[in-house]
Image (spheres, helix red, strand yellow):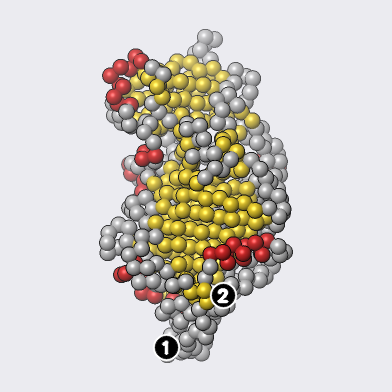
């Protein structure tokens, strides 16, 4: 839990990042890298004129207005054993120095469970879209609103109070308390044998630790989110499987994985000129798993100023845990850029050393590249960057087969971080279901001075812009993978290293040298005939020279080396490179935009 809070609660750093980006967008975009297209020689600029990049992506937009929460869909009843309403210790004294309050005895629920139908969630979203939007943010009590991220992390759900019987189904459900930036009350409902039971707030479910909050009455605050646990590592374990907390953010983990990147339900105008609108999940219905079931299902209601949505998540634990997502969106108003299946990650610096940091670690990132399997069957690998200026890349496509932010580097020695364990963080692979039509995969890279900012976002943008009163349905799967090597049978791009080459007289102008490592699959088989192994390299508005392919005797595979020289016709170039043997493609296509 602490790692999650540490990532999302850097309010001061987010504010600084927003100022930096706002300054860049106000004073022009001379340094903005050109948008990257999936075509070899196509480069087009995407410069947000007044956009507000996702600098504060991981925290809800502030609101001074007091919000009205959604009415519960069904009568409120207690769920399972947590019917306690105890606000102070049994003797009536206050804990941690808090003001004493009268002891309130436990009391049973008074409502009767009612039948649940998934269509009700869709109807709720449709009806909500026909009503004026009301901000879900509310003014928290001062004691909760002023909690630091560190103090908020001290509030722990009591594991012995978890919902569901982990001994029978393997699943356990924990709840998150409101506080810090989490000021949206979330309604939690359990569905058991087709009947809905709402979960009322209970302070007795939480250990407030040394926060000084014990004894306060927070009974009107609801919950902030929830976490699902499952024995991923061993049959007697209880590991985090999935967490839904904050706006529309959620994350999943597989066996032997630790907290890393996250996913979102939706993005609205992220990186666009009008500024980002941040949707939020307002209510959840969690289906109680039956004994022996290998999945758990969650329904969710999403709301935003211009769009509402009904979601279903079928979560399957495993070595590479998977989530099947289906959504139905209803638009109150036109949206310029809707982002489906968005993924959030962090990239501070990597082996290419394009920006220098005074840090004992060799690399700091939760993902090191974007992998795309486009509708033509091509596999593209785009290494990530922490650019000097906002960078937006678009990969035009029709009916994409998959995309994801992956963490390929699994060598602890490259990170040397015993706490964060970047080498064990999952990559996320999105596999669309059905035809998604024309559009593009968009990659947004936001300049960041700190690893506390999730500065990388990737998502699918449909070509048709949603209009007011329209609906949109979609389905996809997210898998928590490792480096993605099981996704295809081509050799992978494992490293991207870059260096400046000074001019050597008039005959040898200054250049940028690229060193790309390819390894895996059938590549080793062809190394015995290096003369017939070639690198297909292309660069728009630039000249490629001194191409070499050498065996990598230390890491396996080969290293492709080439020099890039600008022609002066443009400030940037779109680069592509892949390996082939007598015309047969052996590797992914490495691609990168480059600003001279």
Disc on the earlier residue, 1 or 2: 2
- Residue beneath disc 1: 90
Q: In this rendering, would 567 be left or right of 432? A: right
Foreground: 432 or 540? Answer: 432
- Residue beneath disc 2: 74
Disc marking residue 499? none
Q: Position of residue 541 (x, y in %)?
A: 59, 21
Foreground: 407 or 280? Answer: 280
Residue 528 falls in image quadrant? top left
Q: Position of residue 285 (x, y in %)?
A: 51, 67
Q: Position of residue 148 (x, y in %)?
A: 52, 65
Front: mark 1 or 2 = 2
Compared with residue 508, is residue 17 higher up or lower down, i.e. above or below?
Answer: below
Q: Position of residue 123 (x, y in %)?
A: 62, 64
User: Which residue is at 34% across, 14% downward?
Assistant: 531
Q: Residue furthest top?
A: 507
Q: In this rendering, would 354 be left or right of 534? A: right
Q: CA distance from mark 1 to mark 2?
A: 32 Å
- Count of marks, rendered view: 2
């Amino acid at each position: 839990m602490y790692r999650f809070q540490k990532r999302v609660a850097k309010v001061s750093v987010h504010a600084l990042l927003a100022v930096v980006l706002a300054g860049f967008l106000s004073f022009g975009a001379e340094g903005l890298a050109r948008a990257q297209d999936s075509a070899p020689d196509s480069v087009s600029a995407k410069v947000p004129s007044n956009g507000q990049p996702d600098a504060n992506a991981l925290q809800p937009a502030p609101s001074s207005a007091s919000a009205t929460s959604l009415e519960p869909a069904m009568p409120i009843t207690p769920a399972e054993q947590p019917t306690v309403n105890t606000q102070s210790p049994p003797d009536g004294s206050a804990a941690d120095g808090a003001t004493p309050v009268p002891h309130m005895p436990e009391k049973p629920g008074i409502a009767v469970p009612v039948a649940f139908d998934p269509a009700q969630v869709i109807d709720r979203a449709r009806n909500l879209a026909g009503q004026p939007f009301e901000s879900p943010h509310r003014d928290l009590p001062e004691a909760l609103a002023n909690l630091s991220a560190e103090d908020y992390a001290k509030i722990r759900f009591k594991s012995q109070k978890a919902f569901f019987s982990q001994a029978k189904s393997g699943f356990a459900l924990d709840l998150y308390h409101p506080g810090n930036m989490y000021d949206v009350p979330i309604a939690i409902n359990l569905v058991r044998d087709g009947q809905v039971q709402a979960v009322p707030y209970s302070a007795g479910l939480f250990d407030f630790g040394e926060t000084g909050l014990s004894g306060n009455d927070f009974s009107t605050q609801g919950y902030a989110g929830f976490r699902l646990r499952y024995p991923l590592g061993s049959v007697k374990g209880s590991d985090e499987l999935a967490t839904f907390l904050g706006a529309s953010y959620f994350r999943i983990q597989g066996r032997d994985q630790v907290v890393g990147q996250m996913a979102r339900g939706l993005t609205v105008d992220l990186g666009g000129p009008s500024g980002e609108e941040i949707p939020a999940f307002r209510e959840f219905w969690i289906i109680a798993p039956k004994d022996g079931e290998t999945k758990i299902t969650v329904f969710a209601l999403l709301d935003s100023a211009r769009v509402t949505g009904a979601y279903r998540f079928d979560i399957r634990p495993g070595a590479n845990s998977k989530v099947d997502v289906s959504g139905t969106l209803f638009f109150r108003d036109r949206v310029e850029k809707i982002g489906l299946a968005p993924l959030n990650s962090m990239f501070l610096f990597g082996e290419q050393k394009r920006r220098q940091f005074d840090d004992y670690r060799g690399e700091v990132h939760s993902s090191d590249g974007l992998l795309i399997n486009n509708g033509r069957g091509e596999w593209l690998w785009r290494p990530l960057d922490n650019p000097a200026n906002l960078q937006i890349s678009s990969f035009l496509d029709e009916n994409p087969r998959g995309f994801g932010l992956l963490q390929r580097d699994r060598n602890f020695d490259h990170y040397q971080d015993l706490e964060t364990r970047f080498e064990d963080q999952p990559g996320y692979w999105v596999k669309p279901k059905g035809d998604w039509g024309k559009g593009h995969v968009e990659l947004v890279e936001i300049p960041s001075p700190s690893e506390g900012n999730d500065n990388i976002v990737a998502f699918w943008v449909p070509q048709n812009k949603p209009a007011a009163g329209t609906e949109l349905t979609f389905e996809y799967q997210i898998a928590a993978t490792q480096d993605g090597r099981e996704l295809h049978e081509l050799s992978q791009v494992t490293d991207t290293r870059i260096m400046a080459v000074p001019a050597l007289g008039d005959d040898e102008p200054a250049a940028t040298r690229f060193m790309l490592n390819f390894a895996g699959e059938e590549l080793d088989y062809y190394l015995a005939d290096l003369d017939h192994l070639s690198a297909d390299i292309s660069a728009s508005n630039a000249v490629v020279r001194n191409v070499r392919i050498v065996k990598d005797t230390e890491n396996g595979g080969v290293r492709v080396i080439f020099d890039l020289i600008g022609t002066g016709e443009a400030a940037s170039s779109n680069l592509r490179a892949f390996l082939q043997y007598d015309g047969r493609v052996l590797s992914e296509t490495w691609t990168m935009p480059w600003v001279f």
